[in-house]
Amino acid sequence: MLIDSHAHIDLEEFEDDFEDMLKRAKENDVVRIMNVGFDLTSSRRAVSLAKAFPQISAVVGFHPHDAAKVRESDWAHLEAIGRESCVAAIGEMGLDYYRNLSPKDVQKEVFRRQIHLARQLKKPIVIHDRDAHLDVLTMIKEENAGQNGGVMHCFSGSKETARQCMDLGFHISIAGPVTFKNAPRLQDVARYIPKDRLLVETDCPYLAPVPHRGKRNEPAYVKFVAEKIAELKGIPYDQVAEETYRNTVSVFNLKQ
């Protein structure tokens, strides 16, 4: 069994074949999909889907790209939906210095407040970190952000950054780029991550793995990520599937 630990299946890319997409996921042994919000609207959609489909769980929060759009009144709404029983974590939150769609100081403040909210709700967090490794590490240390567990999603850092994140209580989630020929550093990280700290994801509809690179991604394709990790580690695919399933259930406190 597999769990796609990070997806965005509420987006318009899936409107035309949503039911078929879920069917393909099931046919490829994907038994749960963690659907992740990035603003209030998408977070509410994530909750609605989780209530409608037992194989979907919701993660709700504010993406760093949207940090500058967050209004003070939005925080009460996020707290309210964060209390829903189908919400497994708060996120995706974090810092993105690659695109810098929100000012860095605003990104940090919105990130910090979500860490506090997650602590209040006693839920794990899902972190987006792109070209901001040092500041992300500094903030999660300052805030003891791994207190209730969490995930470094679509990990793109070094082995040393991964080690520090794990020391601070986080799991590491590997996505489609691990299958790319031009990703030796990420492949090295995948070999390095201990079996009890590893998750797999699609981040769909983005970052489709080989052999679907350049096309729309979907949860069924998480198997290609798991297959590549099995190849890199020199272990059976079934072992990767079993261990990442168990780790995802654990970090998100999912009912099996």
Image (cartoon, rainbow, N blue to C red):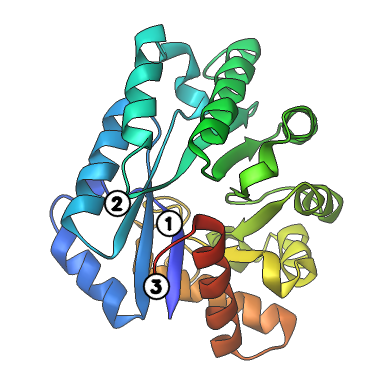
Q: Secondary structure at mark 2?
A: loop
Residue 5 location (% of width, % of height): 47, 59
- Residue at horizontal 62 percent and vertical 91 percent from the top: 236
Residue tagged by mark 2? 9
Residue 116 location (% of width, % of height): 58, 26
* Residue type (three-letter) at the residue carrying disc 2: Ile
Whether residue 86 sits left or right of residue 63 in the image: it is left
* Residue type (three-letter) at the residue carrying disc 3: Gln
Of mark 2 and mark 1, the one earlier in the sequence is: 2
* Residue type (three-letter) at the residue carrying disc 1: Gly
Q: Quadrant of the C terminus?
A: bottom left
Whether residue 198 sits left or right of residue 92 in the image: it is right
- Residue at horizontal 55 percent and vertical 19 percent from the top: 110
Residue 109 location (% of width, % of height): 60, 15
**Label 2, label 1: how far apart the Cα atoms are:** 17 Å
Residue tagged by mark 3? 256
The label shown at residue 214 is 1
